[in-house]
Amino acid sequence: MIRFSESQKHTLVTKLQRYFEDELDSEIGQFDAEFLLDFISKEMGTYYYNQGVKDSQAVLASRIEDVTEAIFELEKIES
């Protein structure tokens, strides 16, 4: 489960409440919004985290490829 600081949790709960008001024309209390945030973190957080790891791996692989190409360009050609 993803854990948030109190400040982050407060921000996320406020965003959930605003979303319910703006998009669903419904009010959600702080307790219910915190409960929903905990559910989303527990049940879906792993998917977001794993995708972030995959994205980081792809960026790193691309950078390593760039460095490898740059090193090959430095090689001297034998005559």
Image (tube, rainbow, N blue to C red):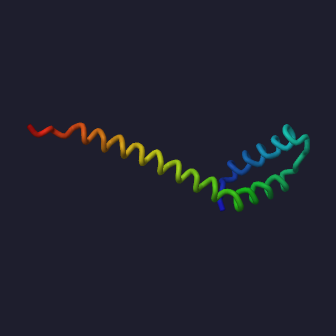
**Quadrant that contains the N terminus:** bottom right
Residue 49 is situated, as x and y percent measured from the top left of the image, at 60, 55
Q: Residue at x 91, y 40 (%)?
A: 25
**Quadrant that contains the C terminus:** top left
Residue 78 is situated, as x and y percent measured from the top left of the image, at 11, 40
Furthest residue to the right?
A: 26
Q: How many marks?
A: 0
Q: Residue at x 71, y 61 (%)?
A: 43
Q: With 20 as the anchor, is 60 left or right in this view?
A: left
Residue 23 is situated, as x and y percent measured from the top left of the image, at 85, 39
On screen, 14 above or below 53? above
Residue 62 is situated, as x and y percent measured from the top left of the image, at 42, 44
Which corner quadrant of the image does residue 15 belong to?
Answer: top right
Which corner quadrant of the image does residue 47 belong to?
Answer: bottom right
Q: Residue at x 36, y 44 (%)?
A: 65
Furthest residue to the front?
A: 79
Q: With 12 as the anchor, is 73 left or right in this view?
A: left
Q: Residue at x 25, y 41 (%)?
A: 72
